[in-house]
Amino acid sequence: MFEAAVVGGVIAFGAIVALVSAEGLVFLGAVLAGLGFVVGVPAAFVYHAKLYAALKQTGVVPSRWWVSPTKHHAAAGEQAEDNFAWAFRLGAAGFVVIVLGCLFVALGVWKLRVQG
């Protein structure tokens, strides 16, 4: 099922790039990136705050825990992880939307340059 969703996404992405004008791609990309920032950044903040609180409650907050926070999910405990998992997923989804938006902007600019 996941593979089918990836293939469908790639086909939809290719169709959008082929059918939408260069200006439309730049606009679509900017909107997606903006939406990703509006949703993803606050969710990421909540995730990091909740993970820190869970780690602090266990009494062990590793130095530079924020560099690779997913390593510390197990240390936070399963119940605590349930408390911040939604924010983790929402922040990750926001990041994916930001990257997709930046990709649309880049392809739109490329199309503008190729068109002359």
Image (cartoon, rainbow, N blue to C red):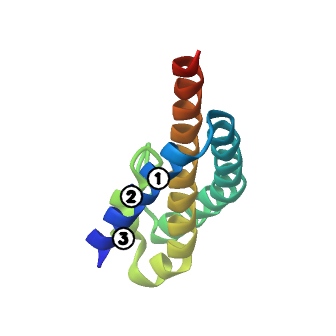
- At horizontal 27% and vertical 69% (from top left) the residue drawn is 3
Is 22 in front, or is 102?
Answer: 22
Q: Residues within 10 Å of mark 2 (few under 14, many from 20)?
A: few
- The residue positioned farthest toward the bottom in the image shown: 79
Mark 2 residue element: helix
- At horizontal 69% and vertical 57% (from top left) the residue drawn is 42
Residues marked 2 and 1 touching at CB (< 8 Å): yes
Query: What's under tag 2, amino acid-wise?
Result: Ile
Mark 1 residue element: helix
Query: What's under tag 3, amino acid-wise?
Result: Ala
Where in the figure is residue 75, as x and y percent of width and height? 36, 68
Q: Which residue is mark 2?
A: 11
Q: Which residue is mark 3?
A: 5
Is 116 in front, or is 46?
Answer: 116
Image label count: 3
Q: Quadrant of the N terminus?
A: bottom left
Where in the figure is residue 87, as x and y percent of width and height? 58, 68
